[in-house]
Amino acid sequence: MAAKAFDVDALLDSAQIIVCCGAGGVGKTTTAAALALRGAERGRKVCVLTIDPARRLAQSMGLTELDNTPRAVAEIDTSAGGSLDAMMLDMKRTFDEIVETHSDPDRAKAILSNPFYVSLSSSFAGTQEYMAMEKLGQLKAASNWDLIVVDTPPSRSALDFLDAPQRLGRFLDGRMIRMLTAPARAGGRAYLKVFTIGVKVFTDVLNKVLGGQALKDLSLFVASLETMFGGFRERADETYKLLKEGGTSFIVVAVPERDALREAAYFVERLETEHMPLAGVVLNRVHSSAASNLSVEKSLAAAEALDESGEEPLTAAVLRVHADRLAVAGRDGRRAAQFRSAHPRVGVVEVAAQSSDVHDLEGLREIGSELSNGPSASAPKIAG
């Protein structure tokens, strides 16, 4: 069966949302930026949302910084009528905006100053993924762009992005949350009277672990957020539906390494199971050799012969480097072929590897060109 084509330019010309996902360290950020730039220079109004602690995206786009507000990227080709805005998710600021939008001023002030809120908004497992989806929903609702490109968080698992709303929902619906809201609703000195004996034992344990004031702070915090819980779930459900709509496409990003390809396979299968629109797979950092006719065996044999003669040590070293590169290229090719064979209905596009990272708009343009036309033998780049 012939490999399925992945027409990246056709996708950029038609999609409304592109979500780049994959395991950490496989090049999602650069892939997302390159796609956004190419889409903008093909005439679309594009916003790229990144979640990148290294902040490489800002540097590559010529911006001194990125924050929670979209910023215009200058020095792009706008002759086709497109534009490019870029932003970096500020997880806590996004959470703060939700509190401020969906609470009255006094309640918002109480929530924002509560120590448990500070901890939840900064470090609760899944908060970053959930806030990325919140921000995506906000950007879509603003209707300022033809195309939104999302670089998902650098999670341990690529599936965290899809699982975050359900995980946060389970937390909000959890037994502990329900018990903690009860004393705060009862208020003041009566707050222990609403508990059954079993719940009182539970709170006594928490009281010993956290201290009386900390338990009260936690209870009041949960009660303050209670009116927002439904809003969290509703927006999560709406964004989840948005991810299934016809204008949304997922791109899975991987590298030709076992763990990354296994993660990509899991994600491909998850998207298929949940009937989510998968556009294709980007396989980054694929090694190749322009002199593949000189095999590993011949290279090593020639290097050994030069060593024995004592002549041309530099040539012998170059031959060994070539043999190593050819071996890596062969390994990458086999792994890519195995992935294609296991997922024949999934289009795959390869981006060639080199030692230097992308650090400017021209580098992003070259990556975009490879994504659309395949690797260039003369100027391979790494999407890292």
Image (cartoon, rainbow, N blue to C red):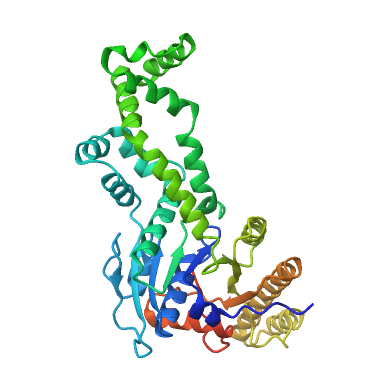
Of the pair 354 and 143, the residue shown nearer to us: 143
The residue that appears at 57% across and 77% down in the rendered structure is 351
Which part of the image, by quadrant, shows the N terminus? bottom right
**Can you say whether 288 is above or below 53 in the image?**
below
Of the pair 381 and 277, the residue shown nearer to us: 277
Position of 271 with respect to 95 (left or right) is right
Q: Is residue 52 visible?
A: no
Of the pair 162 and 306, the residue shown nearer to us: 162
**Can you say whether 99 is above or below 221 in the image?**
below
Residue at the right extreme of this rendering = 1
Among the 4 quarters of the image, the one containing residue 321: bottom right
Residue 225 in the image, given as x and y percentages of width and height: 34, 35
Residue 231 in the image, given as x and y percentages of width and height: 39, 44
Position of 138 with respect to 319 (left or right) is left
**Can you say whether 300 is above or below 179 in the image?**
below
Residue 295 in the image, given as x and y percentages of width and height: 74, 83
**Can you say whether 298 is above or below 204 in the image?**
below
The residue that appears at 66% across and 79% down in the rendered structure is 5
Position of 175 with respect to 313 (left or right) is left
Among the 4 quarters of the image, the one containing residue 56: bottom left
Residue 147 in the image, given as x and y percentages of width and height: 43, 72
Q: Is residue 75 visible?
A: yes
Among the 4 quarters of the image, the one containing residue 119: top left
Count the numbered circles shown. 0
